[in-house]
Image (cartoon, rainbow, N blue to C red):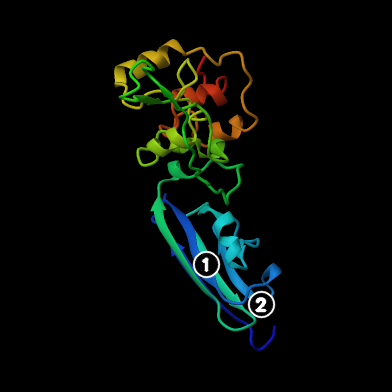
Amino acid sequence: MAPRHAQCWWHIRAPSGKRIQIRVKSVSGACSDGCFYGGTEIKARDFLRVGARICCRSDVRPLGILYSNTELAIISVFSQYKKQHFSIEYKIVDPLNVPPNGFDEYDNINWKVIKENKIEVNKEVEKNKTEKVIKVCRDIATRCFSLLNLCENRLYKRIMRSQCAKSCAVCSSSGEVSDANKNEKEDKEKKENNTKENCGKKDHDGCQAWAKNGFCNSSSYSAIVKRQICPIICKMC
């Protein structure tokens, strides 16, 4: 190694049974392809391989949110030329809030803002110009399927209904997003009426592995989502 080479490490450790959620806020320093001059590396899954490397500022946004596989995550900064700086934020999370294995571990939620189509409820009363917002039931965000565990999470439930309505199975029979203010009795009746809605369809290729990890018994996924993805192995039929 060159005499000018320098490297530092920081270990982040969560309590037993917990995981670490990491978001890179910013980096600065000499920028180069392949981190030739230096960069920041985050190892959150496999410590025997190269982790997520951030060589330039443009690498921060595509990185998205990272989750550790265990209670440990390692941040390292290395430099061959001048100083490298980084800023991150992290928090301890429950394993149920970690995206399922088999998906992109550097998932980027990429929430998008769209303008909903509006129609007039009463065309005869033009003076009042009363308008009703029609929320088309569809997925707006990218990779909603890998974020299904957030559909029932009380912290993300509202935004998931807005951004991943189709994947979270909150669509009404008319193809619109169902009313979030419906009482529990109505929701329960809807689920009971649709118990065999997805029966006869094949399970997703990853269902066997997910079932071993507790997908079928997890409270993070609704019964409707489980029926859509793994109706057979989760015995939803």
The residue closer to the viewer here, 132 or 219, is 132
The residue closer to the viewer here, 235 or 64, is 64
Quadrant in the picture for the N terminus = bottom right
Q: Quadrant of residue 170?
A: top left
Is disc 2 surrounded by few (<14), some (14 to 19) or many (20+) residues within 10 Å? some
Residue at 49% of width from left, 38% of height from top? 114
Q: Is residue 187 above or below residue 221?
A: above
The residue closer to the viewer here, 126 or 224, is 126
Residue at 48% of width from left, 16% of height from top? 174
Residue that label 2 marks? 37
- Horizontal side of 3 relative to 212 (left or right) equals right
Residue 53 x, y percent position in the rendering? 61, 64
The kind of residue tagged 1 is Ile
Residue 169 x, y percent position in the rendering? 48, 25
Residue 215 x, y percent position in the rendering? 50, 32
Q: Quadrant of residue 185?
A: top left
The kind of residue tagged 2 is Tyr
Label 2 vs label 1: CA separation? 17 Å
Residue that label 1 marks? 75
The number of numbered badges drawn on the structure is 2
Say what secondary structure mark 1 lies in. strand
Q: Pick whichever of labels 2 and 1 is earlier in the sequence.
A: 2
Farthest residue to the bottom: give it.
3
Residue at 56% of width from left, 63% of height from top? 42
